[in-house]
Each structure stands twice: as C-alpha cells, then as structure tokens.
Amino acid sequence: MPAPAGTKRVKGKRISRAFIIGSEAWPLPPVGSPQRPANVPDDHTTQWRVYVRGMPGQPDLTTWLKKVQFKLFHTYMNPLRTVDNAPFVVSETGWGGFNVEIRLHFNPASGEKPQWRQHFLQLERYGSDEDRARQEREGVVRSEFVEWIEFNEPTEAFWDEMTADSQWAYLDADKTAAGPSGAKGSGGRGKGATSTTGTSLGGGTAGVKDGKVNVGSGTPAGGPVGVDGIERTSELPDKPTDYNDISLAMEADVMAIIRQAEAEIDKQMAKELERKKKMDEELKKLKEDGATVPVVEKTPATATSERRRR
Ligand code: SLL
C-alpha cells in the first residue's frame, strides 16, 4: 500500500544540521539606580537571555525549526515561554542559574515529534582565570554549545525544503534587515554586554563533550546574522572588529568539529590497516606452508584462510 501523500520518506538519506543553544548574563544596575529596569524584584542581580539560533553562514534554521519552548525555573511567572518565530530568545532577570528545558518544534513537513534539549543558565563567571578575566572585562558571561539535529529518511516534502537554495537567502537579506534566524534580543542588552570585541568569553578553544561542542566564545545571540543595527555578511572578515571577530572564532569552532570527524576517519583507517596487516601475515604463512595461494584481495582475511588451511 503506498504511503499517504506527504509522508513518503526518502530512503537512505539523512540530513544533519548544527545549531547553537546559549545564554548570556550581565549585571543589573543596583537597587535604587535610575538605570535599573522597572518592576524587577530587589533580589534580582542579573539580566540574562537564553536562545536557540543558527550557525553563522549555515542554512537558515527556520527551515526545520518552527517554534521553541523554554521552560524556566518554576518560580518565574509563566515558566513555560513559547516563542513562535525567530529569534528564539527569552530575556529575563534573576539571581541564580538553573537548567532551562528547551523544546524544539519542527517543521510540520518533517513529520517529527518535538525534541527536548537542556541548557544550564550560567550566570557566574566560569572557566580559566583568563576566561574569567575576559568575562569581567567584557561585562557578560556567555555560554554556548553547538548542538546537532539529525533527520533520518526525511519525508520528500521536507527533503525538498532542506535542500533548497533559498535557505541561504537570509544571508543577503540580513545585510539590510533582521534575518529570520537573527536574535533581536527583546530584552535589550546590558551596557557591559555591548562590548564583544574579545575573541572568547568562556571556552576559548572549542571542546567536545557529550556530543556538544562548547563554543563558549564569540558570537552573541544573533551574532553576525542578525543583531539589530549590525552589518551582516556571509564573508569571514580578516580584521577583527566588534562582531566580525566572532565569525573567525566560530570558524575555529567549526574547524574543531571537522577535526573531530577527521580523527574518526583516521581511527577507521588504522583499523583497516591493521586488518590488512593480518591478511598479509596470513598470506605469508600460507606461502610458507606451501599451500596454493588463493586470491585474497577481496576475501575477508582470517576466517577464510584458516578454513582453507585445514
Ligand atoms: C536551585 N539553582 O536549583 C537554584 C535555583 C533559581 C533562580 C535558582 C529568580 C526567580 C524568580 C531566580 O533567579 N531564581 O524571581 O521567580 O535551587
């Protein structure tokens, strides 16, 4: 029986996308300061935002990501915050960090159920002495991770969308207007948070842990692809200024991901070489035994040779 229209899957295909889940935190002006936003409880010390956004220079994440729900600590008013359109960001104030549960809702054409991710809202400075000094200097604590999503045997309709050239259109559109995956930052950014000239705020070098790559550096929410008033470009600049040094930092992070993949390939190669070595040894033994030398080029080594010898 043929599959119902719209649910037919593309066999043997898989589409993976990298994206970023992160948070930024910066101090609130003290109680009594005219700069302190109104209606903020006195015990709140920090402004923060948590976000899901695309990787710079990658296809528009709104092709697959349609809605994000952020589940905040239960004492917050309306702790389940739903963001129906990009930028997928929630801005708040508070006094302590906690785990934000993040529910990703996919393009209905994908036929996929929502998925959960977690992000620890890091308010305190962290990392090496150097990292902490930089966070202090720049006035913002940023914690970002590269996440991956995989669509196995996508539906045909979804496959078409995920392979369409139009997914890159936002890179050009962003030069004149906020792009679909850019984070506009509804809560505004703290005074200190506007300085992002340094290359890295947290992790420095990207490290891979539990399938997540800690970016820890560079790109503010929306980064080069959509902070209001910032020139957008898909090119990697060679001269660092606010924001564009971030592209280079991000490139380094992507390189780290690629290097990890290369390491995996090296491992597989080493295994193959080991297998070949065993085969050669078997062959040598066979020759020494005076047996007729079989054509072993394509033969799975050990078992076959063993059997022949008996
Ligand atoms: C814990 N990590 O697990 C702590 C919880 C909660 C932080 C931290 C204010 C919330 C509000 C705020 O920052 N809470 O005003 O509702 O126990």
Image: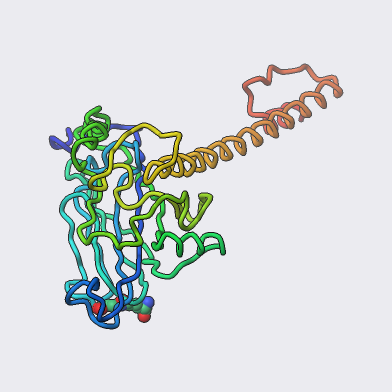
For the image, the number of numbered tags is: 0
Q: Is residue 9 visible?
A: no
- Above or below residue 285? Residue 265 is below
Instruction: Name the quadrant where ligand 1 sits.
Output: bottom left
* Rendered image quadrant of residue 231: top left
Determine the residue positioned at 85% across, 24% down.
Answer: 289
Q: Position of residue 121 (x, y in %)?
A: 36, 66
Q: Is residue 136 left or right of residue 112?
A: right
Quarter containing the C terminus: top right
Q: Position of residue 131 (x, y in %)?
A: 52, 60
* Rendered image quadrant of residue 92: bottom left
Determine the residue positioned at 81% across, 20% down.
Answer: 291
Q: Is residue 39 visible?
A: yes
- Above or below residue 308? Residue 212 is below
Determine the residue positioned at 43% across, 70% down.
Answer: 124
* Rendered image quadrant of residue 62: top left
Q: How is the structure coloured here?
A: rainbow
Determine the residue positioned at 35% across, 40% down.
Answer: 56
Please name whichever residue, 23 or 290, is drawn nearer the observer in this view of the structure: 23
Please name whichever residue, 182 or 151, is drawn nearer the observer in this view of the structure: 182
Quarter containing the N terminus: top left
